């Protein structure tokens, strides 16, 4: 008889999102618990046999008791077994979220805290979960080694549960802490190895998967925002793994070169094509050279999109002020003031000059002040 699991990881409940200030960051913190509830509802609807959470359930061992209670409450829709593994953010120290959960007594019997490296039998013995809890933040040895030496009798499915970096398989930017052998599934005769730590969904080795974080939390295109529905049909057979998107927010990174009014129209269309904007956090990196009037139109476009998106961070340090003759004429300067403006324009065009960014900002301020004066003059005439 087959076994069906949900594999998830890296919830990081309580993550502060210090780089997303105000209400936008608060909404992200709240959404993480809402996403746990969505996982629970999906697990109940699919009638899965267990939900395995492969570490970093919580962002820190110091998160509040209220966050612990809210997390457990969010798990309530699924009545089957949950197996929660300590990761590097919430390692199983003597004083930890795990000891506090036990002391608080808020976790029901179907929530299993896998704080010891010992087998967990589920589904009337048809499934054995072999957990490798991190009992401190970093380990230099592979703590999944014990899987190899622990045989399973009775033809049960063997599933490993661990949190760390699979050796020789992850991209260069991955950390090397908490190593896990890339042949562990084979050497331990596992039907499936459920991993956490890498925040994107990734089949990293044979029968070895990272679920990734179910709620994206950084500007990385590594396929986050999913959970995995894993079906084990036969002991020793290949698992069937279905990726199910579940996250609400998307973190998009857009790099764009601005040149003229037409390029701003292209940028506006490109942003519109990203989809439901209130669910998007964006990091917009701009470069190019613009006249003062066009630069003002760019700033107006950015403010419109800032109001539409959940969060917008803009890096425009490489947008160089390149005032046109019309821009200079509109400033209406004469004599030594015009000479100073011409000098600023020259410096602003010279990217090698140490003050070229400051010169560009100064010209933009002058332009905006002049436009403000003109607007005030028109209003007074009315």
Image: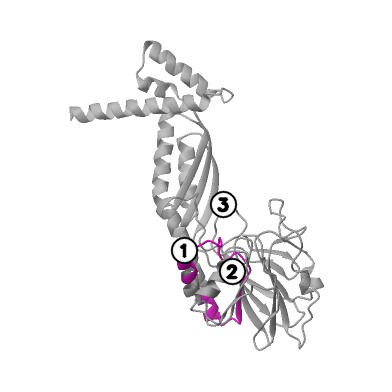
Please, which residue is most extreme toward the top here? 335
Q: Are marks 1 and 2 in contact (CB under 8 Å)?
A: no
Point 62% across, 57% down: residue? 222
Task: Report the front residue among 38 and 304.
Answer: 38
Q: Is residue 36 above or below residue 168?
A: below
Nearer the observer: mark 1 or 2; the answer is 1
> Which residues, given as a range, are shown in magenta?
40-69
Q: Residues within 10 Å of mark 2 (few under 14, many from 20)?
A: many
Whether the magenta-drawn stretch holds residue 334 is answered as no
Point 55% across, 80% down: residue? 46
Q: Quadrant of residue 186?
A: bottom right
* SS of the residue under disc 3: loop
- On residue 314, the disc is none
Task: Report the front residue among 75 and 334.
Answer: 75
| Residue bearing mark 2 | 227
Instruction: Left or right? Give the position of 357 relative to 83.
Output: left
Counting from the top left corner in percent of width and height, residue 334 is at 36, 13
Q: Earlier in the sequence, mark 1 or mark 2?
A: 1
Q: Residues within 10 Å of mark 3 (few under 14, many from 20)?
A: some
| Residue bearing mark 3 | 219
* SS of the residue under disc 2: strand
Q: CA distance from mark 2 to mark 3?
A: 19 Å
Can residue 322 be seen here? no
Q: Residues within 10 Å of mark 1 (few under 14, many from 20)?
A: some
Please, which residue is most extreme toward the left here? 382
Counting from the top left corner in percent of width and height, residue 377 is at 24, 26
| Residue bearing mark 1 | 31
Can residue 46 be seen here? yes
Counting from the top left corner in percent of width and height, residue 38 is at 49, 72
Instruction: Left or right? Give the position of 102 relative to 311.
Output: right
Q: Is residue 213 above or below residue 358?
A: below
Q: Earlier in the sequence, mark 3 or mark 1?
A: 1
């Amino acid at each position: 008889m087959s076994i069906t699991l949900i594999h998830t990881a890296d919830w990081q409940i309580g993550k502060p999102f210090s780089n997303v200030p105000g209400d936008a960051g608060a909404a992200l913190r709240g959404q993480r618990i809402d996403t746990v509830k969505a996982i629970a509802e999906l697990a109940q609807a699919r009638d899965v046999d267990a939900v395995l959470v492969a570490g970093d359930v919580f962002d820190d061992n110091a998160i509040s008791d209220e966050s612990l209670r809210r997390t457990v409450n969010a798990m309530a829709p699924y009545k089957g077994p949950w197996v929660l593994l300590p990761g590097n953010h919430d390692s199983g120290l003597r004083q930890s979220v795990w000891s506090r959960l036990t002391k608080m007594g808020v976790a029901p019997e179907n929530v299993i805290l896998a704080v010891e490296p010992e087998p967990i039998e589920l589904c009337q013995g048809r499934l054995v979960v072999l957990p490798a809890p991190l009992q401190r933040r970093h380990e230099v040895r592979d703590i999944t080694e014990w899987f190899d030496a622990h045989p399973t009798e009775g033809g049960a499915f063997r599933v490993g549960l661990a949190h760390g970096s699979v050796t020789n398989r992850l991209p260069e930017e991955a950390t090397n802490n908490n190593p896990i052998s890339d042949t562990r599934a084979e050497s331990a005769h596992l039907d499936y190895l459920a991993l956490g730590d890498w925040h994107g969904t990734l089949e990293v080795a044979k029968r070895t998967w990272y679920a990734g974080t179910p709620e994206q939390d950084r500007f990385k295109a590594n396929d986050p925002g999913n959970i995995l529905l894993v079906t084990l049909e036969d002991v020793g057979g290949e698992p069937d793994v279905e990726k199910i998107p579940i996250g609400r927010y998307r973190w998009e990174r857009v790099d764009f070169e601005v040149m003229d009014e037409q390029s701003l129209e292209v940028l506006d269309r490109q942003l519109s094509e990203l989809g439901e904007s209130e669910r998007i956090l964006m990091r917009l990196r701009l470069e190019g050279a613009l006249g003062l009037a066009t630069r003002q139109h760019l700033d107006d476009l950015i403010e419109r999109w800032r109001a539409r998106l959940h969060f917008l961070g803009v890096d425009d340090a490489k947008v160089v002020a390149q005032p046109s003759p019309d821009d200079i004429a509109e400033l209406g300067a004469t004599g030594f003031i015009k000479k100073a403006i011409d000098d600023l324009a020259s410096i602003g065009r010279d990217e090698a000059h140490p003050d070229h960014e400051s010169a560009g900002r100064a010209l933009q301020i002058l332009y905006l002040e002049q436009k403000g004066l003109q607007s005030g003059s028109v209003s007074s005439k009315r």
